[in-house]
Amino acid sequence: MSRERRELKQVSPEKPFGMYCCGPTVYGPAHIGNFRTFLLQDVLRRTLEVDGIKVRHVRNITDVDDKTIRRSQEEGKTLAEFTAAWTKKFHDDCAALNMLPPQVEPSAVEHIPLQIAMIEQLVARGNAYVAPDGSVYFKVSSDPHYGKLARLDRDALRTQSTNSNGDANVADEYTRDNVSDFALWKARKPEDGPNFWQSPWGEGRPGWHIECSAMSTHYLGETFDLHGGGIDLCFPHHENEIAQAECSCGHHDTFAQHWFHSAHLMVDGAKMSKSLGNLYTLADLEGKGFSPMAVRYALISGHYRSQLNFTLKSLDDATAALEKIEKAARKLLDKAGITPEEFSQDITVHEQNTAWGAFEPAWTALCDDLNIPGAIGKIFSAFAELNKTELSQADAGTQLCGLAKILSALGIRLFTKQEAAPADIPAEIVALGEQRWAAKQARNWAEADALRNKLAELGWKSLDRKDGYSLEKI
Ligand SMILES: [Zn+2]
């Protein structure tokens, strides 16, 4: 909001740090542009937690809007079953990318009364009006503060009740030059099918913007610490969130105290778009043989305020960088007499230890405006320095603690590919499992299937995950 770097202060230090992030619209798989934003939010949250700050992370699920309704109907499914399936897919991808689940993940459909209550407040305060068809619109001209986040020029702003065609604006989005009153409540239309709810203004459904104002303030209070989203949401979505939330309570500058916008992701130097075929999903990249951890590494490796250009080469680089970190970590583990399996990357194991060792500069970089590329660079400098130093077993243990903390802040897990075989699995089965996994990684499906059948004949099956597998008796 201030366009300045400021200390990230909590509104109420005795309460958890309240962080609201605009979540996915669940009508298809999320693409890497969506995930870059969610991953950067995850790193911010982890960094706060590693610093000892409790965080209350709220991220909504948009499960009713024009797209979810249209697609569910095209597939002949109810809105609920359609969005539940895509919500599950989103959760699976988030878990594969090692993202911490938010403490609260409210669904728009489950909070319709809350949204209606906020719209009623806006109507009562004169910030909204009911159109003849029963839709309710926010009256932009009623809010003298409208445009403060996006820095719209108030004097040049021609706020209008209709869009440029002279019609009421039913679309949820518009440009800075075409600001118009926007829908809080959309009257029921035939194409909505069975997807409508009762309201004081008749049957209909909420507009898109209102859910975030209603749910963020409901779960975090009228004033909370930070609001996040992709830069494309800054206007009009976040501007509208502020207007709805602050006008409904009649106080100004009470909504989110910090805004965390992440810059666009470019792919091969171009904007992501369906027509260019560069809207990669996690499944697309896994199909090309990349691990979710490499995808995570590549997507977080640019500064959040700079555009990141994603290429398949950047995934190769990420894979190589992760291997380099694992190799260096293995050296430290050897010195400390700890196996990779014993190396705890769970931050709670290390939180008592305040020492950062050689990884202190990496932590300092991360705490400076979440400089992730700087922190990653300092991790490699730390390894180079440690390589030149004679370390005792105890020293190596301390350094590993610093490493575990910085990797935990970044959400990077090492050694995810190695899966320790439990001692009670016969060596022959372990070997078959390994061969099958290797064949699958090489996309040699015929061989992978043959090995699976062989395992089954011997009474074993392989449970595959995104980043590895385990063997189980049938
Ligand atoms: Zn939102």
Image (cartoon, rainbow, N blue to C red):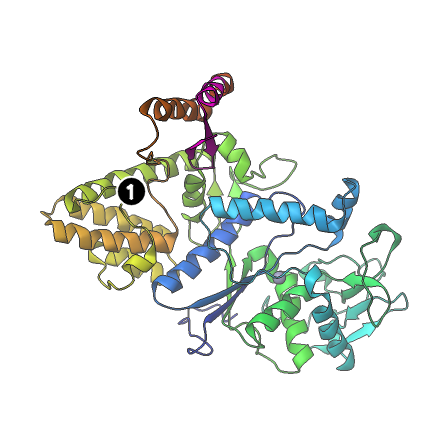
**What kind of residue is marked 1?**
Glu
Q: Is residue 30 visible?
A: no
Q: Is residue 249 above or below residue 73?
A: below
Question: Which portion, as a residue range, is magenta?
Answer: 450-474
Of 474 and 151, the residue lying toward us = 474
Q: Position of residue 74 (x, y in %)?
A: 78, 41
Q: Residue drawn at (78%, 77%), measured in percent from left and top?
A: 123
All told, the count of numbered labels is 1
Q: Is residue 460 magenta?
A: yes
Q: Residue drawn at (34%, 65%), measured in percent from left and top?
A: 51
Looking at the image, residue 143 sits to the left or right of residue 32; the answer is: right
Q: Quadrant of residue 441?
A: top left
Q: Quadrant of residue 211?
A: bottom right
Looking at the image, residue 62 sits to the left or right of residue 32; the answer is: right
Q: Residue drawn at (70%, 77%), measured in percent from left and top?
A: 143
Q: Which residue is mark 1?
A: 341
Q: Is residue 428 visible?
A: yes
Q: Residues within 10 Å of mark 1 (few under 14, many from 20)?
A: few
Q: Is residue 157 above or below residue 386?
A: below
Give SS at disc 1.
Answer: loop
Q: Quadrant of ligand 1?
A: bottom right
Q: Position of residue 50 (x, y in %)?
A: 35, 62
Q: Position of residue 229 (x, y in %)?
A: 55, 59
Q: Is residue 330 above or below residue 184?
A: above
Of 105 and 371, the residue lying toward us = 105
Find out if the beta carbon at label 1 lies less than 8 Å from the nearest ligand 1 atom.
no
Q: Position of residue 80 (x, y in %)?
A: 72, 51
Looking at the image, residue 262 sits to the left or right of residue 420; the answer is: right
Q: Is residue 296 magenta?
A: no
